[in-house]
Image (cartoon, coloured by chain):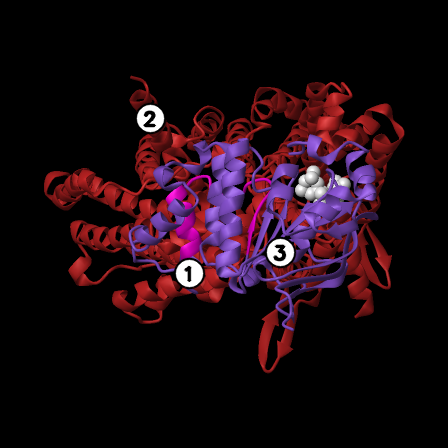
Chain colours: A red, B purple
């Protein structure tokens, strides 16, 4: 028993080393540039693929493996530098949320670059020469390579630490981390340093990717899997803290390894599989830390949210006299099935569902100022709950409210934690929540159908035709969208905006900003749950894909394309997004890259989105005589 | 004898070993205007933050009408009748002046509704409140485009919405013309007398301080160094020495942020 615990601990420490290298790079970059680089997981993946290619080129042996690791790390460093120079440089002054989305655009582009270059199959990487065997400790085997990794992580950490404390360059980097303005005043060439730090951070991630090869094949999920873990590590360790990154990486990895080590346990007559609970364990660790120290183990309490006044837009109460466009639109929507073909009806049903999904995110993100990178958690929860209820014998009329209620309950739970954080930490937390929800759906075979999902979830006879279901969707989702719009100009919306505009003033006039935000999250979560429930009955099936990070980012993209902080923006964004997607997916397999480039361009050039930009133009025209 | 509206007892706060405020004590009675003055960095805003709950004092107590309210969050203090304006104005930038007041009014209800339109219900009250501070004409102007002096007035209107028993004003007239300063302070003084509001304010403009305060306390490097009527403080040699570097007080205008 003790022996197996020891083995699992060593195993966990080996994983911690890889996680630490990636988190270290992320933290270095954040310290100097204040950008949380979403694409850091992509650098990890790129490192793995490049090492595989190098190995294929020169063959096995010491050179093939270790040379490959070094070359891959350096190559990823160069890629990082190029990305910094072409993209990152343009967003250093943008709001945090936009920065995250820009770097997620990079994630999408790199995903397709990997797909294009290396193909869709997993590729088995080289083993470390001479270390393929196992060592025996207390009669149990432990891979030699794990023992090496265990030492290698802290060793690289030490090298970076020496670089930071013993060299001139390191001193300047630390000065810039402590105080950017001061560093600028001292005449430190910031542009060059930023590029250098970014390249170093990317290099570390690339190295970790190459070193991960003996443990897992190069595959397409590496990027988001590792970044979700790294975000958890960063939230637990404290954003910007190097020791925090290591300690948190160790805690998370070791707890996970223990769960696997415990395996199946018989409790009260039922078998509990701890090995399937690894992500839940991760969640519990994170939750405990957040309850005790919301800013992380080694972090410092966040300074007041920096909300640039310029990034806040007014929210005019809609002029009732000008509501005829809405009336006209309603009429067109009602008449639609009579005019167009069946495929278009299905497409518009999709659009309406995603419009609700986007509008619900718009409420917490635009009006509430809370970034969410995990909104798909509620969408998926609604879909799964409705589907499971349906499979258990509930009718459509019961299944839909079940979906909404379950999503609301999830929002109550997640929201409680979310309102304790803000800015990028919040964004990372929401992403981790969604990832955990995904893992539960993926692993809980007996209820969710695991990776296959569930099939045969169809609406009742009455709604079985595409146009009948379209009307049901229009009615339910339309009502929910109107409710969200209404709430923006109701007391809830005002208090929510108040907390966003000036938290300190809001609290000083008696508003409990956290409670208000929590309510908004619950409202938005329920609405997203309704969207999910409607979605699953329109498709007839579902899979864990519904909960994945790209789904969450789809919602973000819709809100952003339409215009965050505008009332109709998210809905407009959903229309544009789904239409474009439908069209591009048919034309090219590289939809991700197209979406990624779109996100990068929007965040850099049109951060106000379609509706915001149109409004600006109109205002400019009106103010000009 | 009844307890003073505000009693500050030996409060102190350090930032990483730097003592911003040390053992400060004073009281403010109902209907009284107390000025807290001192050079830049003296610790005035830090004192305000401890009284209003933005900061937790390292030691000491804050009492409101005798009740110990040390460590209460700002929102609880607001419900107990403490209102505040900020040195760096804090308003809701995406909203109009009227909506800024509306928010303060809406916070009275415990739960924020989803369906009722917020806009029209309190229009009359908002107008009256704005008229009091001379901002009725700007009701529909966005706060983000207001001049600094006007923002200060909006902040005052927000603070007065619930008729506080204690009003804290951190440099209420900064950014205003001399005549406007007098008008604003007269308004506050009149309210204090009529409704028995206790007022604590900081100010760098000595005309404002000596023209409107009933009493003055002087702070330097975190410590209270003098207290008395405006005349006494004006005459005090220590105050002249430390606070004004020997210059005649009346010669010092505006200054500070
Ligand atoms: N959050 C903080 N962290 C560190 N130091 C602080 C903090 N807040 C204030 N200080 C320091 O405490 C001292 C007192 O600051 P405070 O803002 O209270 O002064 P003040 O009297 O209001 O000055 P002013 O007239 O310029 O407004 C200053 O030296 C300031 O730098
Ligand atoms: Mg001050």
Tell me the crowding category of disc 1: few under 14, some 14 to 19, or many 20 or more residues within 10 angstroms, Cα based: many
Same chain for mark 2 and mark 1? The answer is yes
State left or right for residue B80 relative to residue A250: left
Location of residue B58 (image quadrant): bottom right
Tell me the crowding category of disc 3: few under 14, some 14 to 19, or many 20 or more residues within 10 angstroms, Cα based: many
- Residue depicted at 81% across the width and 62% down the height: A6
Separation (CA) of disc 3 from disc 2: 40 Å
- Residue depicted at 19% across the width and 38% down the height: A322
Image position, residue B141 (x, y; %): 38, 36
Label 1 chain ID: A
Separation (CA) of disc 1 from disc 3: 38 Å
State left or right for residue A505 relative to residue A340: right
Same chain for mark 1 and mark 3? The answer is no
- Depth check: give the residue in front, B81 or A12: B81
Q: Secondary structure at mark 2?
A: helix
Residue identifier under label 1: A407
Residue identifier under label 3: B52
- Residue depicted at 54% across the width and 54% down the height: A508
Residue B164 in sight here: yes
Residue identifier under label 2: A619
Label 3 chain ID: B
Image position, residue A566 (x, y; %): 37, 39
């Amino acid at each position: 028993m003790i022996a197996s615990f020891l083995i699992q601990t060593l195993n966990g420490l080996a994983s911690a080393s890889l996680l630490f290298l990636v988190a270290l790079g992320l933290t270095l970059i954040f310290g100097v540039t204040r950008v949380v680089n979403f694409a850091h997981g992509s650098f990890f993946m790129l490192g793995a693929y490049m090492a595989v290619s190098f190995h294929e080129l020169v063959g096995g042996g010491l050179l093939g493996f270790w040379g490959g690791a070094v070359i891959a790390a350096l190559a990823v460093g160069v890629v990082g530098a190029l990305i910094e120079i072409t993209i990152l440089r343009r967003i250093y002054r943008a709001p945090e949320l936009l920065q995250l989305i820009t770097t997620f655009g990079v994630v999408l582009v790199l995903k397709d670059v990997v797909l294009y270059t290396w193909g869709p199959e997993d590729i088995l990487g080289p083993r470390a020469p001479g270390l393929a065997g196992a060592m025996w400790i207390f009669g149990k085997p432990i891979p030699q390579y794990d023992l090496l990794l265990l030492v290698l992580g802290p060793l690289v950490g030490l090298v970076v630490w020496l670089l930071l404390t013993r060299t001139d360059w390191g001193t300047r980097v630390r000065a810039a981390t402590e105080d950017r303005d001061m560093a600028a005043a001292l005449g430190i060439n910031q542009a060059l340093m930023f590029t250098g730090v970014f390249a170093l951070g990317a290099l570390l991630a690339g190295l970790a990717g190459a070193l991960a090869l003996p443990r897992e094949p190069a595959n397409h999920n590496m990027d988001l899997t590792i970044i979700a873990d790294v975000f958890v590590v960063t939230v637990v360790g404290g954003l910007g803290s190097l020791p925090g990154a290591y300690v948190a990486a160790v805690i998370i990895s070791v707890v996970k390894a223990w769960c696997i080590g415990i395996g199946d346990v018989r409790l009260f007559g039922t078998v509990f599989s701890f090995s399937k609970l690894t992500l839940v364990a991760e969640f519990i660790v994170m939750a405990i830390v957040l309850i005790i120290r919301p800013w992380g183990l080694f972090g410092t309490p966040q300074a007041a949210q920096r909300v640039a006044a310029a990034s806040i837009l007014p929210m005019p109460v809609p002029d009732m006299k000008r509501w005829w466009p809405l009336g006209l639109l309603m009429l067109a929507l009602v008449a639609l099935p009579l005019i167009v073909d069946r495929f278009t009806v299905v497409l518009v049903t999709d659009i309406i569902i995603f419009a609700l999904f986007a509008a619900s995110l718009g409420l917490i993100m635009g009006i509430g100022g809370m970034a969410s990178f995990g909104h798909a958690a509620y969408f998926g929860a609604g879909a799964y709950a409705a589907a499971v209820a349906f499979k258990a014998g509930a009718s459509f009329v019961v299944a839909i409210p079940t979906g909404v209620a379950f999503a609301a309950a999830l929002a109550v739970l997640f929201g409680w934690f979310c309102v304790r954080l803000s800015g990028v930490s919040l964004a990372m937390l929401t992403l981790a929540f969604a990832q955990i929800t995904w893992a539960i759906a993926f692993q809980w075979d007996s209820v969710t159908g695991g990776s296959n999902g569930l099939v045969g979830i169809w609406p009742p006879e009455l709604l079985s035709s595409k146009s009948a279901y379209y009307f049901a969707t229009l009615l339910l989702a339309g009502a929910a969208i109107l409710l969200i719009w209404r709430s923006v100009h109701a007391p809830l919306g005002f208090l929510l905006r108040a907390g966003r505009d000036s938290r300190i003033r809001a609290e000083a006039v008696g508003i409990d900003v956290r409670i208000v935000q929590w309510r908004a999250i619950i409202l938005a979560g329920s609405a997203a749950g309704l969207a999910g429930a409607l979605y699953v009955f329109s498709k007839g099936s579902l899979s864990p894909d519904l909960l994945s990070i790209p789904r969450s980012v789809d919602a973000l993209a819709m809100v952003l394309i339409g215009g965050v902080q505008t009332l109709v923006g998210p809905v407009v964004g959903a229309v544009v997004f789904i239409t474009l997607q439908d069209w591009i997916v048919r034309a090219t397999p590289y939809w991700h890259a197209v979406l990624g480039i779109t996100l990068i361009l929007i965040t850099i050039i049109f951060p106000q989105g379609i509706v915001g930009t149109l409004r600006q133009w109109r205002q400019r025209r009106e103010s000009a005589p | 004898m009844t307890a003073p509206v505000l009693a500050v007892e030996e409060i102190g706060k350090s930032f990483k070993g730097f003592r911003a405020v040390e053992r400060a004590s004073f009281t403010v009675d109902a209907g009284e205007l107390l000025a807290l003055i001192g050079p830049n960095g003296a610790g005035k805003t830090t004192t305000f933050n401890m009284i209003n709950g933005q900061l937790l004092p390292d030691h000491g107590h804050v009492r409101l009408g005798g009740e110990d309210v040390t460590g209460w969050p700002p929102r609880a203090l607001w419900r107990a009748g403490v209102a505040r304006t900020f040195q760096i104005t804090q308003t809701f930038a995406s909203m109009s002046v009227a909506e800024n007041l509306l928010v303060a009014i809406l916070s009275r209800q415990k739960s924020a509704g989803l369906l009722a339109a917020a806009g029209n219900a309190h229009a009359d009250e908002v107008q009256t409140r704005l008229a009091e501070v001379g901002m009725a004409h700007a009701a529909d102007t966005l706060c983000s485009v207001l001049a600094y002096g006007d923002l200060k007035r909006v902040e005052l209107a927000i603070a007065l919405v619930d008729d506080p028993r204690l009003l804290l004003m951190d440099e209420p007239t900064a950014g205003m013309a001399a005549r406007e300063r007098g008008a604003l302070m007269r308004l506050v003084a009149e309210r204090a007398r009529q409704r028995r509001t206790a007022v604590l304010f900081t100010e760098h403009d000595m005309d404002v301080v000596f023209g409107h305060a009933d009493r003055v306390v002087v702070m330097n490097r975190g410590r209270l160094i003098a207290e008395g009527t405006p005349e006494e403080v004006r005459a005090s040699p220590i105050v002249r020495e430390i606070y004004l570097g020997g210059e005649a007080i009346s010669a010092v205008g505006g200054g500070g942020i």
